[in-house]
Image (tube, rainbow, N blue to C red):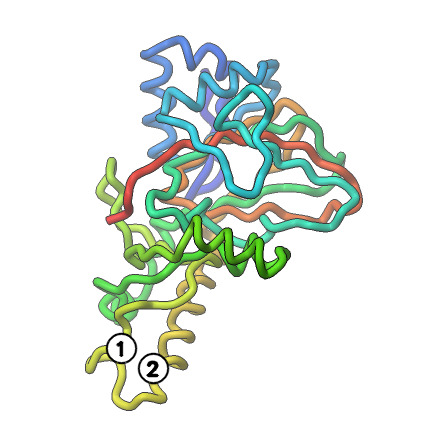
């Protein structure tokens, strides 16, 4: 197996290895897992695999979960369809960590390209460990112990009817997570806010708010500043898809952005999402 780092911050391409073999080989799996913790996202080209191989590989990292909006591939629980057609309904073209609106967000995901445009449709991943590490010290002090609410309503629910949106919120109410979470395996600190973050829940303290009018502008400006860190190129890697390409990423330590520049060309991807634990 050849390992080719793609940037100084994040991402590596692994060559001469099949994820179907990784699923069956304990030693090879242990090596891949260690590389994932180091590089945050791993890429594989020319993967001639089946859906069963895809699921078997992802399942080595933990239980799989479905999505309340995306369709599940029939016969393969935990494997969802991300199919784009001439209908302009893209949701993924924003920097985000998958499903932070869950009480227990996913710890990872494995995405396979079935078909894609010849040009366009890249995906960007961001190292949110570096994003936190490089924050100014005064910002780190200000966000220590801060928590934020995360919700699905204002993203996937935005195109739904009122009744559908209320039902979605009933099933998936707002949850709160630390603004700086800790990686359960590496102990690293991670900046953990994004487009699913709606507001801070413990910002209104004497240290942060002198008068009532400081509350909302101060919190909103800080939240927007933190969310903007994912757009810094020095923390990113950009991957061009081809049929048979596969990516696996650490959803705890990264965010990603699916570049939606290929409309109206179709694209078909399938993703296995790995269940996680409550952030701390």
**Element assignment for label 2:** helix
Which quadrant does the N terminus fall into? top left
Task: Give whichever of 268, 241 is nearer the camera.
Answer: 268
Residue 12 can be seen in this image: no
**Element assignment for label 1:** loop
Q: Would you place residue 234 above or below residue 57 in this image? A: below
Residue 233 in picture, x, y percent from top left:
51, 54
Residue wearing tag 2: 215
- Which residue is found at the position 55% from the left and 48% from the top? 257
- Which residue is found at the position 62% from the left and 36% from the top? 82
Residue 213 in picture, x, y percent from top left:
36, 89
Residues at marks 2 and 1, CA–CA distance in whole angstroms: 6 Å
The numbered mark at residue 204 is 1
- Which residue is found at the position 38% from the left and 50% from the top? 128
Q: Are marks 2 and 1 in contact (CB under 8 Å)?
A: yes
Task: Give whichever of 147, 171 is nearer the camera.
Answer: 171
């Amino acid at each position: 197996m050849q390992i080719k780092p793609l940037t100084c911050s994040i991402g590596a391409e692994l060559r001469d290895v099949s994820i179907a073999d990784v699923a069956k080989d304990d030693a090879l799996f242990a090596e891949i897992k260690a590389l994932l913790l180091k590089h945050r996202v791993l890429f594989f080209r020319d993967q001639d695999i089946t859906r069963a191989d895809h699921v078997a590989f992802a399942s080595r990292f933990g239980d799989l979960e479905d999505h309340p909006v995306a369709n599940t591939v029939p016969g393969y629980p935990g494997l969802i369809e991300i199919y784009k057609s001439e209908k302009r309904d893209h949701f993924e073209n924003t920097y985000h960590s998958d499903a932070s609106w869950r009480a227990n967000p996913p710890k990872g995901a494995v995405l396979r390209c079935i078909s894609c445009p010849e040009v366009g449709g890249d995906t960007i991943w961001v190292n949110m460990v570096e994003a936190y590490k490089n924050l100014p010290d005064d910002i780190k002090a200000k966000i220590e112990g801060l928590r934020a609410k995360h919700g699905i309503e204002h993203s996937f629910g935005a195109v739904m009817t009122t009744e559908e949106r209320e039902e979605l919120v009933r099933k998936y109410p707002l949850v709160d997570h630390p603004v700086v979470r800790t990686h359960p395996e590496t102990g690293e600190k991670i900046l953990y806010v994004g487009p699913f973050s709606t507001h801070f829940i413990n910002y209104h303290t004497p240290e942060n708010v002198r008068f009532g009018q400081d509350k909302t502008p101060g919190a909103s400006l800080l939240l927007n500043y933190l969310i903007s860190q994912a757009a810094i190129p020095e923390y990113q890697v950009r991957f061009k898809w081809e049929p048979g390409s596969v990516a696996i990423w650490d959803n705890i330590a990264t965010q990603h952005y699916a570049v939606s520049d290929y409309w109206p060309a179709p694209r078909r991807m399938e993703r296995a999402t790995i269940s996680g634990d409550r952030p701390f």
